[in-house]
Amino acid sequence: MINGEVHMMINTTVSSAQTMADIIPLWKSTYYVDPNNWVGELFGTRYHGTRTFSYYSNPEFDRRLDRALVSDSQEERQKLYEEMTQMVNDDAAGIFVYNTKWYGPYASKVEGIRFSPVSNGQDIRWASLKR
């Protein structure tokens, strides 16, 4: 099979709860810097069959997610996403066994490197050569 065929097969398999495997190893990087990228997209019912490989469904979680997605208060959003994360943890909806350790493979002549959760830590927008 070529990549497109494999991708299509995977999308078809995970697109419904009936064809979904019991366990799926999943690697996900941060695509945008917001907690919805993680807990919202991975566990929200609104994302079933699209951005999630989970068919976890919790009405209280979904109520919080709906509120967090429209809130313009950073404090409210933080509280809601922390509560949703705790719900997922309490319900054992996912088992997380790996987090990136960033080693930053850069020459000693490079300065200004900062870790970023986007692109697996390889964000070099602050980098420059030492003078």
Image (cartoon, helix red, strand yellow):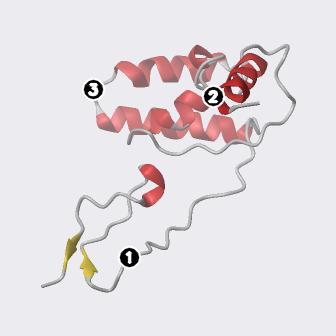
Q: What element carries label 2?
A: helix
Residue assigned mark 1: 106
Nearer to us of marks 3 and 2 is 2
The Cα atoms of the two marked residues, 1 and 2, are separated by: 36 Å
* 35 or 53: nearer the viewer: 53
* 33 or 121: nearer the viewer: 121
Sequence-wise, the earlier of marks 3 and 2 is 2
The Cα atoms of the two marked residues, 3 and 1, are separated by: 38 Å
Q: Disc 3 marks which amino acid?
A: Asp
Q: Disc 2 marks which amino acid?
A: Phe
Q: Disc 1 marks which amino acid?
A: Tyr
Residue assigned mark 2: 43
Q: Is mark 1 on a helix, strand or loop?
A: loop
User: Where is residue 9 drawn, in percent x and y?
Assistant: 75, 22
- In this picture, residue 89 sits left or right of residue 36: right
User: Where is residue 12 drawn, in percent x and y?
Assistant: 74, 16
Q: Is mark 3 on a helix, strand or loop?
A: loop
- Please determine whether, in this image, residue 127 is positioned above or below residue 81: below
Q: Which residue is drawn at 87% across and 30% down?
A: 22
Q: Residues within 10 Å of mark 3 (few under 14, many from 20)?
A: few
Residue assigned mark 3: 72
- Please determine whether, in this image, residue 131 is positioned above or below residue 106: below
Q: Residues within 10 Å of mark 2 (few under 14, many from 20)?
A: many
* 42 or 15: nearer the viewer: 15
